[in-house]
Amino acid sequence: MFSIFKMPKGYSKSIHSFVIILSVFGAIMVTSASMYQNIDVFRVGFTLAKNFGIIIAGYFLMLAIAKLATLPRIKAIIFPLAIIMGVVLLIPLFFAARGGAKAWIALPLIPFTIQPSEFAKVVVILLFAIYAGDVPTAQKSWLEIMKIPFIFLFVYTFMIVVLQRDLGSGVILFALGWMLFLMPSNPRLMRPKIIFSVLTLAMFGFLFFLISPPGIAFINKLPLSAYQLNRFNDMANPFINRYDSSFQLFNSLIAFTKGNWWGIGLGKSVQKLGYLPVADTDYILAIIVEEIGIFGFIFILIGYVVILFNLLSKAMRLKSERGKMIVFGAALYLMLHFILNVGGVSATIPLTGVPLLMISAGGSSQLAIMMALGFAQAMIAKERIP
């Protein structure tokens, strides 16, 4: 019975080790970020216990998936799972908004929320891998191959961005599907892949234009809400509205400056005392740098690089195209969150409000990334990639 909670032979020990190291480090830093004025010992202990409880739950979920997940099993459940996921994405609409978004389900009796959009990202990875990978050349047209994953991708994105008003999660989910579409080698997908590749390059060019001074001027001429315009204007100059819309971003930059190389000491952050109200989630990196310095960021960066390098290098050596797409999807999921979170809190790109996976507070994101890595480990172990 307990054998399902042992990693299968052939799994990546490097990925496994650094997932644990980063998760434990994140739990400690989230607890430190939650230590504001007049907090009592019970509250600190509860926060630490809650974070470690989520890590333990996610760890055993990752082990079970790594042990039990196979491509035939995934194929058998993915369509009904995608339908269920679509229904679950509607449930947050019946709960109160948080930070302007209706993206969470508040559980009764316990202080815990669920963000379905995080799990939708894992479903999208599996959908594209199963439907687009290892398809016989002459079996279907490209539209027949991609119809189901594209339908779910656009429906999920609409639900998250328009109904839930969670732009950050919607952007990552859509990017996952878009990039995974470019992976399959089926000749029938070649022409649309070329078109999509050109569109991808054009989108990247347009995004770089939007964060440039001429781009900011262009955005301010568009009929957007003040909230949307502020994201770009605050990124361009966090000092203008530092007592209003860019209050947190401004104080995030102060935290980075104060931290220097070695920080001011664990638990001694000043910016978490009301200057960064979401210090343990969106701005956890600012608190880390303030308390333990740039060394803390380098530590996280090394962990991410090791995990991403192992995922990408092993994905390239997998024979199964479906397995390759699942492993690559997990790497892309991790990388997109890193870029958007670090770029947002450092005013390099507009803030999107996505967590720094395995570091920020958030049970849903922790469970979801461990699920994605569990599926990746299952694919790696199956072919015993060294």
Image (cartoon, rainbow, N blue to C red):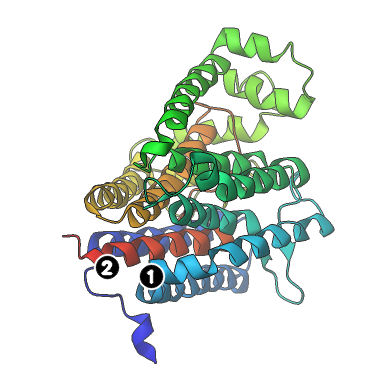
Q: Position of residue 122 (x, y in %)?
A: 51, 57
**Residue lying farthest to the front in this orientation:** 138
Task: Tell me if label 2 and label 1 are in contact, CB under 8 Å.
Answer: yes
Q: Indicate the amino acid at tag 1.
A: Thr
| Viewport quadrant of the N terminus | bottom left
Q: Position of residue 343 (x, y in %)?
A: 49, 32
Asked where in the image residue 335 lies, by quadrant, the reply is: top left
| Residue found at x 47% / y 46% | 140
Query: How many residues crowd around disc 1 within 10 Å: few (fewer than 14), some, or many (20 or more)?
Result: some
x, y percentage for residue 119? Answer: 57, 59
- The C terminus lies in which quarter of the figure? bottom left
The residue at which mark 2 appears reads as: 382
Q: Could you say whether the residue bearing mark 1 is in a helix, strand or loop?
A: loop
The residue nearer to you, when weighing 349 against 65, is: 65
Query: Which residue appears farthest toward the left when viewing the image?
Result: 386
Query: Amino acid under label 2?
Result: Lys
Q: Is residue 365 visible?
A: yes
Please give the name of the residue rendered at 72% of the width and 27% of the height, measured from the top-left corner. 228
Determine the CA span between mark 2 and mark 1.
8 Å
Residue 213 sits in quarter? top right
In the image, residue 99 sits, relative to residue 320, either above or below, namely above
**Residue 353 in the image: above or below residue 31:** above
Kindly identify which numbered label has been placed on residue 107. Answer: none
Q: Residue at x 40, y 64 (%)?
A: 375
Q: Is residue 271 visible?
A: no
Q: Residue 70 got which mark? A: 1
Q: Which is nearer the eye, 214 or 284? A: 214
- Whichever of labels 2 and 1 marks the residue nearer the N terminus, that label is 1
Q: Position of residue 146 (x, y in %)?
A: 53, 45
